[in-house]
Image (spheres, coloured by chain):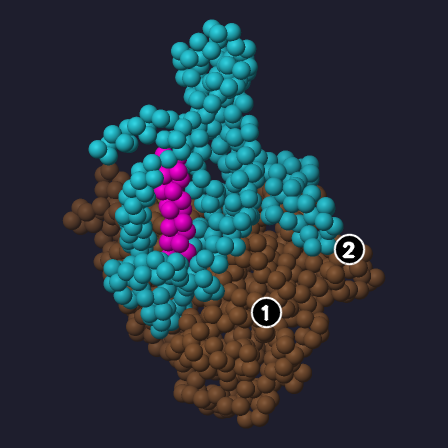
């Protein structure tokens, strides 16, 4: 078992290296470079000397493979370098100050999605083609089809402008420092409602659909029949025998969405003015801030690989067939 | 394209041109009753569409940083409401007869935010910072003409120029930096890494930094020791909101106190009574014009008659009404109406399709039986019109131009290209036939970089490859004189030639359309826009919305 995990881990390393190499090259191939962005593309005062200085500072005058080697050499020492943005702050610090917000929002969002999607999925599977199932199906397709930003704007107009019940954007009111502790929490909660609502809406649709599908497959299995045949009550059949098995593929999908927790949603964060990872990444791309882009990428792709690995390993714990298969493969 | 003001901080003062209030706009020239005395306090909330990238604007290039920086720092000179250069940290100055020597006398009551006195040594230090090859600044050009800068005594400064330089005085509007704080960083070429670029900047401006939360907000508080008296508004909060739509909704919900509107928002979406009561609207021509440019290396466009014909065939009024809902004014040349260099009497090209046809016929282009414009060899007149992605206005202009030229039998194909590759692959390599673009203009009329025939290299700005010896001479003379009347003659002649030549078709100056919460008083719209006297804005006591303490 341990050997299997280790082997997978070793295989992940060259993969990670490949990912970083390809991304590094692609980013540098994109037109526009930080030195140009920062000296003003086409302004009268754009200064060739300043541009050259920046190029040298950032090693951009070196061949691409040298740049990559240097970046990699720093990375193995866990040094993500300094941002190319004029504030020249360390990449890890920049990511560090954005990460908590995104993580916090996405975890809440995930909990809400799972908390709602599982019961919805189970219910619409066990009552296939009932009114509930049909209504949720429609809801799901609407959810899939609704663009985030459009929904966000409509909700902002309704709750923020027309009714004035909820704040439109940001995470805190401007007078936050002057509020009492409980008022601060209340204020913060108010700011969370709309972004979480919008982010949940799309995700809920997909997830409840997976749940329904998985449940439908399990319910048709023989062992469910036999559970019923031996006279178990329906809630136990569904809740204990069916649900546990139906959750398996869903857990995998959940595991794979782990990196998404870090990445942040660009649209939701931009439209609600939430200073999270998504915003950081967009800004880095616009500024051609290579170290921040690469740092972000390394973290997200590492997480994806780890999540994959963890999902596989847990799977083999849960499902003996995979474990056996792995052993046979080793021989 | 980015605004090309020689001095960033002057570019920032968005507003230029004729007095602000058009027919639409509220006249906000203080309709305050006498009882509403200027009062201290309240918070002014502004939205920034992008994060600021640092706190020492001399080494930055984004407009958000300039906006914040202009309140934290000051220069020796600034522009008043009528765009005249007036003293800020300098009290007075004198040029020698030959324009080569400039003597500046500094104010004696100015203190840095850390209470150290501001002296001529700081000015010398700022100059040395700007010309230091290790300083990554884009604003070095202004100081290349300087031969020497010398502090005669702590409050007198003597500058000597290598040759007369028209922008000499204006260049001293550069943000002054504190020597006692930043010297080691400049020496080591690490100015950007100085802690003052990330927190607690030390300037001489009307406001001090209280807090900068990247991606979220920047908070400034009034500087009680500001040399011109403490500003009235006690606190400014810049909220960073990356979505234009969200800013507009925040404005409607009174979450921000000021924002720039689009023409559509200004005309159609803010005309209801509640909005008009909550905000005052202003309009004045912005510091940039939009044009159709031709690659003059292309033989078809090298013929002036063709360009003149196109100028007659394009209806500027139609474009202004269609694209800007009328909120702009026709451009006749590269200077904004209302500025001192602007000449209203140049040749214009009224919409006249017949005249256009005549001119084209003279140039050898005639419509054939299929209605296609062809030359003697029966080659049709067809070209590609390029513009950059993300600018809806330019795309619409291109479409109107396309339709107008179709009348003449010219086939125009429009291509919209992502900004970075547009610059790199098309503009810099001169791989275009025609473009729809804009120029940001500075407060000084010197446009050597754009029109001089020596500036046609790949990284240079005369990308249409315009060359006219007389224009070259005028530009050279214009930038080496320190007398306005003399310069005005050169620039008047320059505008005459450009109007006759039509190297590009000057289309329009768009209006800047800011709105400001109606509780704010003291705003006086002027040729210099509204922001120039921000430290004199105030909110009467009974209208104050936020407590500052």
* Number of marks: 2
Q: Which residues are magenta?
A: A285-312
Dot 2 falls on which chain? B
Secondary structure mainly formed by the magenta segment:
helix
Q: Residue at x 69, y 48 (%)?
A: A184
Residue on which the image places disc 2: B543
Residue on which the image places disc 1: B200
In the figure, what tint was chain B given? brown
Q: Eyeballing the image, is B159 above or below B215? A: below
Q: Residue at x 36, y 42 (%)?
A: A305
Q: Position of residue B269 (x, y in %)?
A: 60, 42
Establish whether labels 1 and 2 are both on one chain. Answer: yes
Among numbered discs 1 and 2, the one appearing first in the sequence: 1
Q: Is residue A292 magenta?
A: yes
Q: Residue at x 61, y 41 (%)?
A: A192
Name the mark nearer the viewer: 1 or 2: 1
**Left or right: A25 with respect to B20?**
left
Q: Which chain is cyan?
A: A
Q: Position of residue B58 (x, y in %)?
A: 49, 71
Dot 1 falls on which chain? B
The one of A93 and B84 positioned closer to us in this rendering: A93
Residue neighbourhood size for the residue with mark 2, other residues' Cα within 10 Å, grouped as few (<14), some (14–19), many (≥20): few
Q: Residue at x 47, y 6 (%)?
A: A229
Q: Is residue A178 magenta?
A: no
Q: Position of residue A160 (x, y in %)?
A: 65, 40
Q: Position of residue A162 (x, y in %)?
A: 67, 37
The one of A39 and A217 positioned closer to us in this rendering: A217
Residue B213 visible in rendering = yes
The one of B282 and B369 positioned closer to us in this rendering: B282
- State how far apart marks 1 and 2 are (Cα): 31 Å
Q: Eyeballing the image, is B158 above or below B201? A: below
């Amino acid at each position: 078992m341990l050997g299997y995990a280790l082997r997978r881990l070793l295989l992940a390393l060259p993969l990670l290296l490949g990912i970083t190499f390809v991304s590094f090259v692609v980013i540098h191939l994109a037109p526009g470079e930080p030195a140009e962005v920062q000296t003003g593309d086409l302004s009268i005062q754009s200064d060739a000397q300043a541009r050259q200085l920046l190029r040298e500072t950032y090693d951009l005058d070196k061949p691409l493979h040298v740049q990559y080697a240097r970046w990699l050499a720093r990375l193995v020492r866990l040094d993500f370098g300094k941002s190319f943005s004029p504030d020249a702050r360390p990449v890890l610090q920049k990511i560090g100050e954005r990460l908590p917000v995104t993580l916090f929002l996405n975890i809440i969002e995930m909990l809400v999605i799972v908390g709602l999607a599982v019961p919805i999925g189970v219910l619409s599977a066990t009552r296939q083609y009932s009114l509930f199932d049909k209504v949720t199906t429609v809801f799901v397709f609407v959810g899939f089809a609704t663009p985030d930003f459009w929904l966000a704007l409509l909700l902002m107009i309704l709750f923020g402008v027309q009714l004035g019940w909820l704040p439109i954007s940001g995470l805190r009111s401007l007078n936050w420092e002057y509020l009492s502790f409980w008022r601060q929490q209340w204020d913060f909660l108010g700011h969370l409602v709309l972004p979480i609502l919008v982010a949940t809406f799309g995700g809920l649709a997909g997830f409840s659909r997976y749940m329904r599908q998985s449940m439908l497959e399990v319910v048709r299995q023989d062992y469910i029949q036999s559970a019923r045949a031996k006279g178990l009550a329906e809630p136990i059949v569904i809740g204990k025998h069916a649900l546990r098995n139906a959750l398996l593929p869903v857990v995998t999908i959940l595991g794979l969405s782990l990196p998404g927790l870090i990445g942040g949603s660009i649209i939701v964060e931009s439209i609600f003015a939430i200073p999270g990872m998504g915003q950081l990444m967009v800004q880095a791309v616009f500024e051609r801030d290579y170290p921040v882009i690469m740092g972000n990428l390394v973290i997200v792709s590492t997480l994806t690989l780890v999540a994959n690995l963890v999902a596989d390993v847990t799977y083999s714990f849960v499902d003996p067939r995979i474990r056996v298969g792995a052993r046979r493969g080793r021989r | 394209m980015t605004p090309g003001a020689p001095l960033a901080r002057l570019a920032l003062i968005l507003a230029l041109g004729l007095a602000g209030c058009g027919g639409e706009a509220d006249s906000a020239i203080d309709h305050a009753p006498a009882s509403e005395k200027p009062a201290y306090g309240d918070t002014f909330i502004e939205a920034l569409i992008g994060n600021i990238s640092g706190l020492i604007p001399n080494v930055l290039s984004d407009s958000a940083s300039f906006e914040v920086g202009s309140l934290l720092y000051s220069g020796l000179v600034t522009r008043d409401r009528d765009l005249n250069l007036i003293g800020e940290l300098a009290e007075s100055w004198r040029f020698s007869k030959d324009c080569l020597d400039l003597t500046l006398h500094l104010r004696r009551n100015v203190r840095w935010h850390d209470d150290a006195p501001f002296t001529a040594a700081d000015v010398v230090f700022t100059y040395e910072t700007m010309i230091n090859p290790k300083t990554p600044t884009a604003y070095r050009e202004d100081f290349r003409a300087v031969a020497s800068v010398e502090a005669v005594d702590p409050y007198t400064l003597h500058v000597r120029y290598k040759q007369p330089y028209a922008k000499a005085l204006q260049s001293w509007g550069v943000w002054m930096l504190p020597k006692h704080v930043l010297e080691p960083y400049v020496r080591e070429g690490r100015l950007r890494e100085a802690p003052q670029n990330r927190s607690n900047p030390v300037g001489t401006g009307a406001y001090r930094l209280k807090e900068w939360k990247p991606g979220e907000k920047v908070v400034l508080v009034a500087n009680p020791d500001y040399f011109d008296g403490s500003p009235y508004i006690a606190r400014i909060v810049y909220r960073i909101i990356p979505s234009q739509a969200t800013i507009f909704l925040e404005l409607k919900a009174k979450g921000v106190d000021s924002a720039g509107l689009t023409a559509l928002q200004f005309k159609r979406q803010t005309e209801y009574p509640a909005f008009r009561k909550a905000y005052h609207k202003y309009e004045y021509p912005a510091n940039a014009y939009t044009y159709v440019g031709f690659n003059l290396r292309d033989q078809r466009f090298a013929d002036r008659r063709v360009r003149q014909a196109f100028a007659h065939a394009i209806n500027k009024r139609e474009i202004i009404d269609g694209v800007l809902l009328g909120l702009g004014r026709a451009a006749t040349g590269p200077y904004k109406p209302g500025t001192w260099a602007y000449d209203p009497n140049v040749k214009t090209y009224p919409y006249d399709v017949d005249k256009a046809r005549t001119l084209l016929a003279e140039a050898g282009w005639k419509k054939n039986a299929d209605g296609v414009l062809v030359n003697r060899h029966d080659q049709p007149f067809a070209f590609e019109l390029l513009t950059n992605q993300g600018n809806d206005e330019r795309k619409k202009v291109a479409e109107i131009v396309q339709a107008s030229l179709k009348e003449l039998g010219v086939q125009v194909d429009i291509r919209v290209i992502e900004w970075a590759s547009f610059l790199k692959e098309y503009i810099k390599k001169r791989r275009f036939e025609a473009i729809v673009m804009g120029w940001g203009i500075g407060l000084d009329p010197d446009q050597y970089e754009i029109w001089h025939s020596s500036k046609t290299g790949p990284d240079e700005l005369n990308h249409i490859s315009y060359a006219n010896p007389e224009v070259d001479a005028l530009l050279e003379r214009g930038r080496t004189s320190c007398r306005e009347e003399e310069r005005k003659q050169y620039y008047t002649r320059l505008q005459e030639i450009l109007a006759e030549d039509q190297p590009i078709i000057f289309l329009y100056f768009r209006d800047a359309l800011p709105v400001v919460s109606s509780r704010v008083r003291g705003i006086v719209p002027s040729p210099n826009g509204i922001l120039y006297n921000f430290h004199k804005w105030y909110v009467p006591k009974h209208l104050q919305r936020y407590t500052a303490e």
